[in-house]
Image (cartoon, helix red, strand yellow):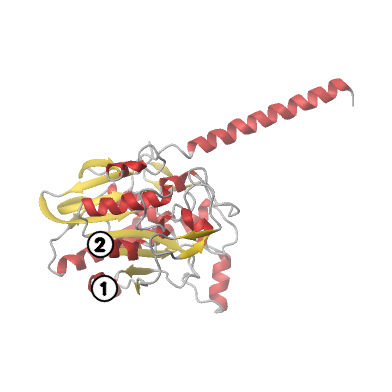
Amino acid sequence: MTLEKKHISAAIILIAAAVISIITGRQFLAKHYPETFYPSPGLTRTGKLSDYFSGLQGTENDSRVYFFEGEEEGSTVLLLGGTHPNEAASGLVAVLVLENVEVTVGRLIVIPRANRSGFTVNDPMEAHPQYYSIPTPNGERRFKYGSRLTSPLDQWPDPLVYSHRPSGQRLSGFETRNLNRAYPGRPDGSLTEKTAYGIVQLIKKENVNVAFDLHEAAPEIPIINAIVYHEKAEEVALNAIFELEMEGISVSPELSPSNFHGLSHREWGDYTDVYPFLMETSNPIQGRLRGETSAELIVEGVSPEYRMALESGALQIAYKETGEPIERRVARHVTCFRRVIEAYNQLGNKPVILENLPEYEDILQNGVGAYIVAGK
């Protein structure tokens, strides 16, 4: 090869590298742009987590907080989505609620992206898509699909062993970036601990009475299609589950273990006056048996590998032959959320009345897209 040809080859390689860098750089920056939401007319005001803890100001986790306040006084409910940004139904339910809800009595506070940092990255070695789309009557709406953990660009390095404060519980080092292992949080801790601290301060300062943390998990996880509750909220949880079972929606009651620290359903209940609930649905993309990983798997929830596992009878898994589509997962969360609030009201507490939210069968028949605004 002549010197001239070598120069041409080198120039082509440099140009290709520059093009790739530009494309990937734009993709990286796009994950950092905040998503646009379209709150219902019932929205009364917005704020940020830094309103409750100034240490979050200017960080990726200074998440937006949405308030819906009825004309009549009542109790206050907090709905948290996006604790784990790789659990799609969690964040999608929060968006559906804030874009539809009307509050006539009491207050509803929605944080659709609790760990916003986690939405800027994906979990390494998992081949996860960066986005998934939901069809609506007016076009598709694209949502970020993120990581279970706070981005390492915002919090690094991980320790060899994560020691939870104040309990001293020891976990794997990467759990230091797991928001649902960080409660009650610390004002002088890591970004994840500061985020947890800010959420706890919000619960205290806004006198939240009932709080929900939405999640999804792999079909083979024992605690699935469940409501996890603190012992002081047991009567509310069991009454709600009874009503759900009467409707044909099977839900497992799970009491929060008193010796497993850092989780919302334990530490919210221990450190504040709130009645906390964590809800789980079954999501095949999070499982180890899932096979091909794609945005379609997030939305359609169909995995031949999980169907084979189900038919074999070798594993006890929460997977239906028709799959676990996002419509069913969202419908479960919305309905469980509503029934817990109704059970809370029925026990003589100051009520919270939410209107204009779809029922279980509505979401199954019409799809999630019927209840969210198309992207603009």
Residue 77 in view here: yes
Upstream in the sequence, badge 1 or badge 2? 1
On the image, the x and y values in percent for residue 232 come to 25, 71
Amino acid residing under circle 2: Arg
As drawn, which residue projects farthest toward the top?
4
Query: Are dots 1 and 2 in contact, CB under 8 Å?
Result: no
Q: Residue sitting at 33 percent across and 47 percent down?
A: 372
The residue under label 1 is 234
Question: Which element carries disc 1, helix, strand or loop?
Answer: helix
The residue under label 2 is 338
On the image, the x and y values in percent for residue 265 come to 33, 64
User: In this orientation, which residue lies closer to the viewer: 55 or 317?
Assistant: 55
On the image, the x and y values in percent for residue 373 come to 33, 43
Amino acid residing under circle 1: Glu
Label 1 CA crowd tier, 10 Å (few <14, some 14–19, many 20+) = some
The quarter of the displayed image where residue 52 is located: top left
On the image, the x and y values in percent for residue 312 come to 57, 77
Quick check: 346 above or below 194? below
Quick check: 233 above or below 9? below
Q: Residue sitting at 38 percent across and 52 percent down?
A: 91
Q: Residue sitting at 60 percent across and 61 percent down?
A: 291
Give the left or right position of residue 267, taking residue 20 as reference.
left
Q: Residue sitting at 64 percent across and 33 percent down?
A: 20
Residue mark closest to the camera, 1 vs 2: 1
Question: Which element carries disc 2, helix, strand or loop?
Answer: helix
As drawn, which residue projects farthest toward the bottom?
313
Give the left or right position of residue 166, taking residue 130 as reference.
left
